[in-house]
Amino acid sequence: MNPTEQTPIADAVQRAAGQTDVQKLLQLFSDFYKALLRRDGAALEKIIADDYTLVDETGRTIDREKMIENVSTGKVVFNELSRRDNMMQLYGDNAAVWISVVTVRTEVKGREVNGRYRDAATFLKTASGWRLAATHLTPA
């Protein structure tokens, strides 16, 4: 699925919350995937909140600095990312949760690691706009 493609759930959220925030979240998620694929640490710094936490598929937590370092230095290389079964829920004007199934093809320290995961991504609206605050991956 194209990260910016409109989904039925996004259509429903737009009707409930207004187009602006939904479009910004769709674009932010698209930009996040592009930054991972391009190993673009500068873009990730703009997208990921300062207190970001990733809970990976093994239950290990990774903070913002380590996530950006792993991607930008090539310790983790994303070769392919796709998402489906998207569900988004806005909570008031400042929080959103996006749940989807993510298929990834990666290399971690030179070793191929591929999988399909249920992804719960939490976004918060800050003074500078929407930011990715947390991601939790579970094998799907």
Image (cartoon, rainbow, N blue to C red):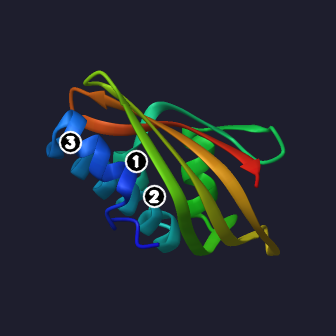
Lower position in the chain sequence, tag 3 or tag 1: 3
Position of residue 2 measured from the top left corner of the image (x, y, whole percent): 41, 73
Callout 2 touching callout 1 (CB < 8 Å): yes
Q: Classify 47 as above or below 1.
A: above
Q: Classify 118 as above or below 5.
A: above
- Which label sits on residue 69? none
Q: Spatial distance from mark 3 to mark 2, Cα to Cα?
A: 34 Å
Residue at the extreme top: 92
Secondary structure state at the residue bearing disc 2: helix
Q: Which residue is mark 1?
A: 45
Seen from the viewer's position, the closer of residues 7 and 91 is 7
User: Looking at the picture, which amino acid does disc 2 mark?
Assistant: Gly
Q: Nearer the viewer, mark 3 or mark 2?
A: 3
User: Looking at the picture, which amino acid does disc 1 mark?
Assistant: Glu
Name which quarter of the figure residue 129 lies in: top left
Badge 3: few (under 14), some or many (20 or more) residues near its Cα, within 10 Å? few
Name which quarter of the figure residue 14 lies in: top left
Q: Which residue is mark 2?
A: 41
User: Looking at the picture, which amino acid does disc 3 mark?
Assistant: Arg
Residue in the picture at 23% in, 35% down? 16
Badge 1: few (under 14), some or many (20 or more) residues near its Cα, within 10 Å? some
Q: Spatial distance from mark 2 to mark 1, Cα to Cα?
A: 6 Å
Q: Spatial distance from mark 3 to mark 1, Cα to Cα?
A: 31 Å
Q: Is residue 38 visible?
A: yes
Position of residue 48 measured from the top left corner of the image (x, y, whole percent): 43, 42
Secondary structure state at the residue bearing disc 3: helix
Q: Which residue is mark 3?
A: 15
